[in-house]
Structure formats: C-alpha cells, structure tokens
Amino acid sequence: MSWALTRWALRRLGTAAVVLAVVAVLVFVLFEALDSDAATVLLARQGGAEPSREQLAALRAELGLDRPAPVRFADWVVRFAHGDLGTSLLSGRPVADVLLGRLANSATLALVTAVLLVPLAIGLGLVAGARPGSRTDRAISMGALTAESLPPFVSGVVLIATVALTLRLLPAVSLLPTGASAWSRPEILVLPVLCLLAGLAPHPVRMVRAQTAQVMAAPYIRTARLNGVRGPRLLLRHVAPNAISAAVHPLAGALVGLIGGIAVVETLFVYPGVAQELLRAVAGRDFPFVQSAAVLLAAAGVGLYLIADLVTMLTSPRARDLVLERR
C-alpha cells in the first residue's frame, strides 16, 4: 500500500513538473511575440525624439537582449533552477527583492480570504443541503448562483458604489504608504476580501450542498435518525465528513482562483500587491520579472492541487482504494 501511494505521489510530482515547464515555455514564447522589448520602453520613457537604431542596439546589448532567444531562455532556466530569479530590466533590482516587497501584501489578502472562504463555503453548503428544498436551501442556492454569475470586477464596482461611495463606510481604494503593512490599515482589506469571496465561494458552496443533500438521503442517515441522532450532532458527526471530502477539490480550485482573482481585485481597488507590479512589468516588457513571477504563481496553483489530492487520499477511503486498484 505504501509503495503504491509513493508511486502515485511521484507520478503527481512528475506531472506538476511538466506543467511548470509548459508554463515557462508558453510565457516565454508569448513574451517574444510582443511588438517591443524593454530597451524600446526604457528609451521611450526618457522622452525626446524617437531613439535611433544605434541607441536601441547599445541598450539591448547592455540588457542582454541582443542574444538569441533560446540562449536567453536557457540562461533564465539555469538561474531559476539555482534559486536566482534574475534582475529586473526596468529597475535593475533583483526580481526576488521586488517580489518580496509586494508579496507580503498579496499574501495577506489571500490569507484573510482563504481563512474566511473555507468555513463559509462548508457551513453554507451544509446548512443548505441539510434540508433540501427548504426556504433556507433556496435562499442560499439562489444567492450562490447569483454571485457566481457576476464577474469579480462587477461585484467590486457594486461594492465600491454602495458601501464606499454611497454609505461611506469603507475606503473605495486600498492605498498603502510605501513599505507599510496591510495590517496597519485593516479596513482597506474588507471590500477586496468581500469581492473575492463573492466570486470564489459560490461554486464550493453548491458542491457541498449537493453532496450534503445526497448524504442526507443515504440509508445510514435514516438509521441514525431512528436511533435518535438528530440536529447538529447528526450533521457534524455523520453528514459533514462525507460531504466535505467531496468538496476538497472545489475548495482547492477556489483557492487557486485566488491567484487570478487577486490580480483583478488588486487592480480594481489599487491594492499594492504582486498583480500591480506584474502588470507594470508586462507593460515595460520586463522579461525576467514576468517569467519568474508567472512560473512561481503557477507553482503555487499546482501545489494547492497536489495538497488537495493528498487530503482527498487521506480522508476518502474510496479515492484511496481507486488509486491502489490502478497499481
């Protein structure tokens, strides 16, 4: 059994490595297809007349952009494999330093959202599925479907218009002084977190609700009721474990969705996180920053799915048996 699980884990890790390699190549190819490079952007920002070919050639040589594309990609791969994320072409600072300066704010936003998302999705799903067809079930299901149908930027605009501009309860933008922590102004996190929850929670809520309703109709639940087990005890002890195991992957998908959702929310609320820096890097054709950030974000998403697979294996005997039968 242990050897079969080890083989399964190694196979998953190999698949993850292939996914990251594909992401790295795809980002590089798309970046090379752009109509300009960092040298062009830097000279354009200096103002004045259009730069000459000699100026462009000199700056490209200085930045290393005159080398063939495969050579530049191979150089990045070797550096990345050794933990060197490269140097920003625009600022001249190490990419790792730039990322760390913004990563703390993005991680704070993601952490607060995740801490609220998991119990919220599980709790609402269990409450709705415990009494299928009831008013509570219909209200939660309708609310989840409505929230899921709205793009995050629409939810954000609605929150800004109502809570911030009309009611004036919270700031419309999430600005922070340079170097300050988001914890120093927790009120700026409220609207971005609500926007993320509105976009990410509905799908796992609906999955938990559907699984809970299915479990409630199972014979062993009827037996438990006949034995006098009812209310919260029935829901938490007999229904929740089976319902939650089916929600692991939807919840993992929602957590992975934080990566894309945070990019939208940070832009909408002017929140100083990684997404804003990444957008600036794309506009400035800063290849080392974009390439390293994209692969790291992809690695975070793949890692979450691997953890979800592991949790499913540990909590679901059926999933574990299926893996063992394939070996």
Image: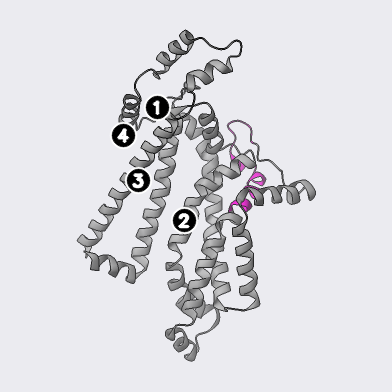
Residue 81: mark in rendering: 4
Residue 253: mark in rendering: 2
Q: 305 and 44: which one is in front?
A: 44
The span from disc 3 to disc 2 (Cα, nearest Å) is 16 Å
Q: Secondary structure at mark 1?
A: loop
Q: Secondary structure at mark 3?
A: helix
Circle 2 or circle 1, nearest the eye: 2
Judging by the rendered image, the residue that carries numbered circle 1 is: 86
Circle 3 or circle 4, nearest the eye: 3
- Within 10 Å of the Cα at label 1, are there few (<14), some (14-19), or many (20+) other Cα atoms? many
The span from disc 4 to disc 2 (Cα, nearest Å) is 27 Å
- Which segment is the magenta one? 176-196
Q: Tell me if residue 247 is in the magenta stretch.
A: no
Could you tell me residue 203's position as x and y percent? 53, 62
Q: Secondary structure at mark 4?
A: helix
Q: Tell me if residue 177 is in the magenta stretch.
A: yes
Circle 1 or circle 3, nearest the eye: 3
Locate residue 88 relative to residue 8 in the image: left or right. Answer: right
Circle 3 or circle 2, nearest the eye: 3
Mark before the other along the chain sequence, 1 or 3: 3
Judging by the rendered image, the residue that carries numbered circle 3 is: 19
- Within 10 Å of the Cα at label 4, are there few (<14), some (14-19), or many (20+) other Cα atoms? few
Mark before the other along the chain sequence, 3 or 4: 3
Q: 132 and 238: which one is in front?
A: 132
Q: Amino acid at mark 4?
A: Ala
Mark before the other along the chain sequence, 4 or 1: 4
